[in-house]
Image (cartoon, rainbow, N blue to C red):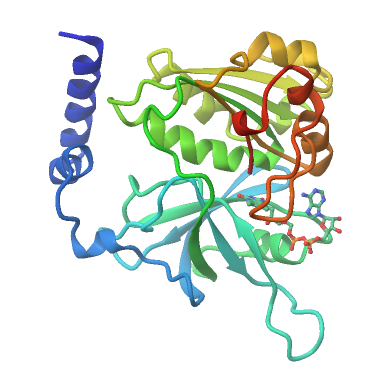
Amino acid sequence: MSAATARIRTAALGFAAAGTAAGLATRLFGGRPSQCDSGSFSKSEFRAFRVSSVRQVNHDTKILRCALPSEQHVMGMTVSSLVMVKGGAGGEEGKPPPARPYTPITTDDQRGYFELMVKGYPSGVVSKHLCSLKAGDMVEVKGPFEKLPYKANMKKRIGMVAGGSGITPMLQVLKEALRNPLDETHFTLIFGNQTPSDILLRQEIQELAATSQGRLRVVFIVDKNPSGDSGVQHVGYLTADVAKAELPPPSPDTLVYVCGPPGMMKAVSGAKGKPPAQGDLQGILKDLGYTQDMVFKF
Ligand SMILES: Cc1cc2nc3c(=O)[nH]c(=O)nc-3n(C[C@H](O)[C@H](O)[C@H](O)COP(=O)(O)OP(=O)(O)OC[C@H]3O[C@@H](n4cnc5c(N)ncnc54)[C@H](O)[C@@H]3O)c2cc1C
């Protein structure tokens, strides 16, 4: 039995055990989606979804799990996509609340709910509102809006450089790619945070790597390591030397995703342009010989 066949069989057993054999057949081999597969969001209007649970991830970040219309519904989202979320004080009187983009960390593989991981900024209008929500509250969402479509095997190697809550689009792609036994792309995730205790979803990410059959390698990098955490590979800001040692080398078969706070983006890949523009490639990746078409800034 080939490695790919073994992976299909393992995945098939897992899916069947979860009672979703019909969904597996549709997903792996094509077929007509059910009505619930057509999606729960609208691109033209905000729709309200009930928050079913809230999980504190670290001191300033929460995961909101939001219920879809039924347990069979999916978001109806291609990977990778974002949604617009509305909420908070609208500023001037009579003005609607503002909306900001967020990246669901679940995919259409999850039925019945979707999850948003939100970092709350003390002076941030929408993020503060979202982080104040409790189970039973409603969240208003519009979308999904596609960023860069992910296709199985579109590249041999994908590098990911994420800072803090910039992990969200990487999680979306990794969940989609690693669940597919026919996808052979290898991923290296460099995930930067301030300290080891700030590392978002550390255990989940390690589990993704452990069950990836060698397709995902994770490198944690922190600004400071006061606890001497031995699970962290690098201390200090990402340098060209570290990026060169850890990322797949520049090649037409390589893509590097970058997502993080503006300072990190500037240093690693150059600032992001106004969407949909990417902005010129600069910084560490340019210095290492990557070209514009080898890098995508979320
Ligand atoms: C494509 C895309 C996807 C995104 N996905 C996610 C996601 O999945 N999860 C998530 O938490 N966020 C995500 N964001 C960021 C999100 O859209 C908001 O920008 C963020 O939540 C702040 O919005 P706000 O209304 O709370 O702050 P605003 O009211 O817009 O800003 C108020 C103040 O908050 C602070 N602030 C806001 N943003 C930042 C920042 N990036 N770095 C430092 N300080 C800041 C500043 O002090 C600022 O003056 C994404 C952004 C983009 C462009």
Give 150 or 288, whichever is nearer the viewer. 288
Vertically, is 226 above or below 88?
above
Q: Name the image quarter holding residue 246.
A: top right
Left or right position of 64 against 27: right
Vertically, is 212 above or below 79?
above
Left or right position of 46 against 271: left
Give 176 or 122, whichever is nearer the viewer. 176
Q: Residue at x 67, y 47 (%)?
A: 61
Image quadrant of ligand 1 equals bottom right
Q: Name the image quarter holding residue 27.
A: top left
Q: Residue at x 18, y 60 (%)?
A: 34
Vertically, is 258 above or below 38?
above
Q: Residue at x 74, y 79 (%)?
A: 90
Left or right position of 120 against 101: right
Does the image show residue 38? yes
Dividing the image into 4 quarters, which one contains the C terminus? top right
Dividing the image into 4 quarters, which one contains the N terminus? top left
Q: Residue at x 17, y 27 (%)?
A: 13
Does the image show residue 230? no
Q: Name the image quarter holding residue 162.
A: top right
- The residue furthest bottom is 94
- Circle count: 0
Q: Position of residue 203 (x, y in %)?
A: 54, 27
Q: Position of residue 240 (x, y in %)?
A: 79, 16
Q: Position of residue 9 (x, y in %)?
A: 17, 22
Q: Position of residue 232 (x, y in %)?
A: 69, 15
